[in-house]
Amino acid sequence: MLDVRNLEAFYGESIVLNDINLHVPNGQIVCLLGRNGVGKTTFLKSVMGLVKTPKGSIKFNGEEIVKKPTYYRARQGISYVPQGRDIFPQLSVHENLLLGLEASGGNGNIDEEIYELFPVLKAMLKRKGGDLSGGQQQQLAIARALVSKPKLLILDEPTEGIQPSVIQEIGRVIKQLNSEANLTILIVEQYLEFVVEVSDYYYVMEKGIIVTEGFTMELNQEEIQKRMSI
Ligand SMILES: Nc1ncnc2c1ncn2[C@@H]1O[C@H](COP(=O)(O)OP(=O)(O)OP(=O)(O)O)[C@@H](O)[C@H]1O
Ligand SMILES: [Mg+2]
């Protein structure tokens, strides 16, 4: 579904990603691991067209999108939940969800399925986004990314700063979306147990390059943990 080859990314003159090759097969959950500052978010922004990528290829369902603008990529079915969630604090939960429709150029309806996935949101539709807990905001951000019915959902550190019970809830929803709706998912994560719990395949990034990859079932937790800690 997503096929990234020999990708380089820059901020100004400085190179942040070097020769990245990463593949997300249709129907799978793929995780990108790595410690702080290695370039994980930059990679996701590259996929969304939010940073300069003068070299390399990004194919989505066979189509080259590396030079396409962000809105085009969103309309092709890529939906992105940024790190830190980017909820609009002054807008209500419902208004935040409606923004997800606009981003994709869709019409004005939010499927009931969204509230079935996140019952907590249904109870809080009129509440301001900024008044939700961190975990509820993360659920709102994921729900907002889903209202456009994406083919590929991209999540940047969905467990960051969230209590364990909500992490479990988010993990359950991610697995359900994948198994029942056949949604393909790419997750950046530093929390190894979550990666082991949800993903099929993993990549580990160090300083802008991919250093190891494999099937999650065969992942050696001790070895990966060593690469993740400083
Ligand atoms: N807008 C920017 N302009 C210049 N440099 C940036 C910018 N954003 C990030 N960087 C630098 O690029 C490198 C990679 O940052 P990035 O945010 O991709 O890392 P990350 O792996 O997502 O880290 P974290 O786990 O802390 O979120 C870092 O050295 C960072 O300081
Ligand atoms: Mg990041």
Image (cartoon, rainbow, N blue to C red):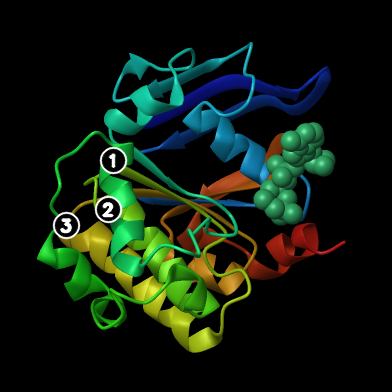
Image quadrant containing the N terminus: top left
User: Which badge, 1 or 3, comes first in the chain's sequence?
Assistant: 1
Tag 2 residue:
98
Label 2 with label 1: CB-CB less than 8 Å: yes
**Distance between the Cα atoms at labels 2 and 3?**
7 Å
Q: Is residue 44 above or below residue 119?
A: above
Identified at 26% across, 50% down, the residue is 183
Q: Contact, CB < 8 Å: mark 1 with mark 3?
A: no
Query: Which circle marks residue 110 in the picture?
Result: 3
Mark 2 Cβ inside 8 Å of ligand 2: no
For the residue carrying disc 3, how many other residues have a C-alpha within 10 Å: few (<14), some (14-19), or many (20+)? Answer: some
Most foreground residue, 146 or 127: 127
| Figure check: 217 above or below 51 | below
Question: Which numbered disc covers residue 80?
Answer: none
What residue is pinned by disc 1? 102
Residue type, numbered disc 1:
Glu
